[in-house]
Image: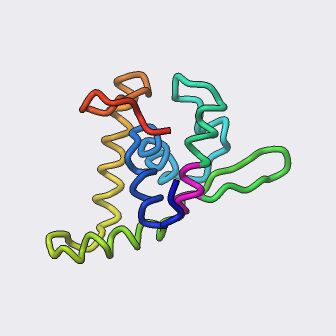
Amino acid sequence: MTDDPLDLVFSALADPTRRAILAMLLEDDMAVTDVAAPFEMSLAAISKHLAILARAGLIRQEKRGRVKWCKLEPDAMRGASVWMQGFGQFEPVNLEEFERFLERELADADLSGGTAEPEDGTAPLP
């Protein structure tokens, strides 16, 4: 896997579960167990998703006592935004619009049991 920050961000955002997790973290910091609660997958699987988000710099994880917490890194998508703006077809990132998009993604994931598959029928990325 590449260590290019832009590749890591786009790879992390490619998965619907990870986008749903980001939407949840827009509200507040969450314990890993609270992040995992709405999903029909193991805590280990959620931890892998969180590790990918952390590696991409989209979230930060920290231990508070015995509990591992997740916090959204709001400026982490700045590089991707700047890259997209270079094509001249994208407006600067509107965080309120992005929040609405992620909330819709989360609602869609809730309706499908939290295990949304990509629309093209391919397997989700790890």
**Residue visible at 67% across and 44% down in the picture:** 31
Q: Is residue 11 magenta?
A: no
Instruction: List x then y, in percent, for residue 46.
Output: 59, 36
Q: Nearer the viewer, residue 53 or 109?
A: 53
Above or below 85: residue 18? above
Q: Nearer the viewer, residue 97 or 17?
A: 17
Q: Residue furthest right?
A: 65
**Residue visible at 40% across and 72% down in the picture:** 78
Which residues are the magenta region? 52-59
Q: Nearer the viewer, residue 25 or 2?
A: 2
Above or below 36: residue 2? below
The reply, left or right, for residue 32 in relation to residue 59 is right
Q: Residue furthest front?
A: 1
Q: Is residue 55 magenta?
A: yes
The reply, left or right, for residue 28 in relation to residue 26 is right
Q: Residue furthest left?
A: 89
Instruction: List x then y, in percent, for residue 87.
Output: 19, 73
The reply, left or right, for residue 71 in relation to residue 122 is right
The reply, left or right, for residue 105 in relation to residue 44 is left
**Residue visible at 61% across and 48% down in the picture:** 51
Q: How is the image coloured?
A: rainbow
Instruction: List x then y, in percent, for residue 12.
Output: 45, 51
Instruction: List x then y, in percent, for residue 94.
Output: 29, 67
